[in-house]
Image (cartoon, grey):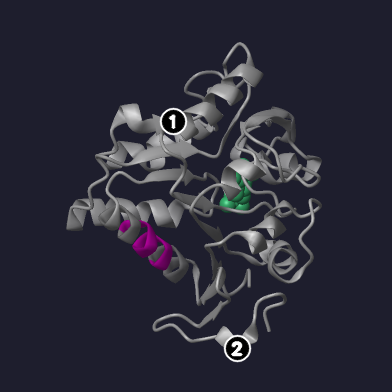
Amino acid sequence: TAGNLPESSCKPLSGLKDAIGGDNVKVIVADDYEIMSREAAKIVAAEIRKKPDSVFALPTGGTPLGLYAGLIRMHKEEGLDFSRVSTFNLDEYIGLPDGHESSYSFYMYDRFFNHVNVSRDKIHIPRGLAKDPEEEAATYEWAIKRAGGIDFAVLGIGRNGHIGFNEPKTEFGSLTRPIYLAKRTIEANARFFDGDPDSVPRQAISMGIRTIMNARKVILLASGPEKSRAINQTIHGPVTEMVPSSVLQLHPDCTFFLGRDAA
Ligand code: GLP
């Protein structure tokens, strides 16, 4: 069963374990992380082929690494062309020194941008060192609008259901803005800071829930048993600001790509 999703529209998808879909929300369960990443990469590639100047929202974290690796492979082997694509990262820590290896900016160039032909002037990441983070956030939101809005948002999910850095209790109407990280997020992300929670910045600039919901298409990737509770609440639970990702039940075109362990 799939909570609020109509069971009648459940249908199997070749090569994948299950696909459960309502009109607006689809849940695809892959046997393992590699299959999940590969299938997600195919969907992203299809979007780029259909609309070469697509505007993407992009995530960081451990989960999308397989997706980025798949896209790099498709660029090198199949000539997947990123030259007209625009990207907007979901979030960035506030206050990390330029080039810090745990910054999302470093991550994106290291793991993805340096290996594909995305045009440098079409890459957008909130500047965590901006003098005025409020102004930086407002400018970022405006830049998304100016680019024509986000065509395709790729999301991960935090253990508490956060998307981007929109922690529980974030208003669904929120736009890009500076936020404070939840204690649980600081603890979970300490693994990217030599295991030291005290080194994790307390603040970040994040797209808001409304910014994400304005995207024309959304996919969310999750793998690992530590995500299963959040996924359960996201798909089966009530739509509530206590579980920010639950808002995606209301999105007109959202697909969850789940590893079996997260599902
Ligand atoms: C961070 C990011 C999120 C990401 C989440 C999950 O907090 N701000 O965008 O989805 O981590 O990360 P991981 O995939 O490493 O579990």
User: Which quadrant is home to the N terminus?
Assistant: bottom right
Which residue is label 2 attached to? 8
Residue at 18% x, 52% y: name it. Answer: 79
Residue at 59% x, 40% y: name it. Answer: 192
Residue 209, above or below 177: below
Q: For the residues marked 2 and 1, what is the alpha-carbon distance in whole angstroms?
A: 40 Å
Magenta residues span 39-45
Residue 186 position, x and y percent, is 73, 39
Secondary structure mostly seen in the magenta stretch = helix
> Disc 2 marks which amino acid?
Ser
The residue carrying pointer 1 sits among few (fewer than 14), some (14 to 19) or many (20 or more) residues within 10 Å by Cα, namely few
Which residue is label 1 attached to? 146
Please state if 17 lies on the left or on the right of 193 as rendered: left
Residue 242, above or below 249: above
Residue at 63% x, 68% y: name it. Answer: 262
Residue 263 position, x and y percent, is 63, 73
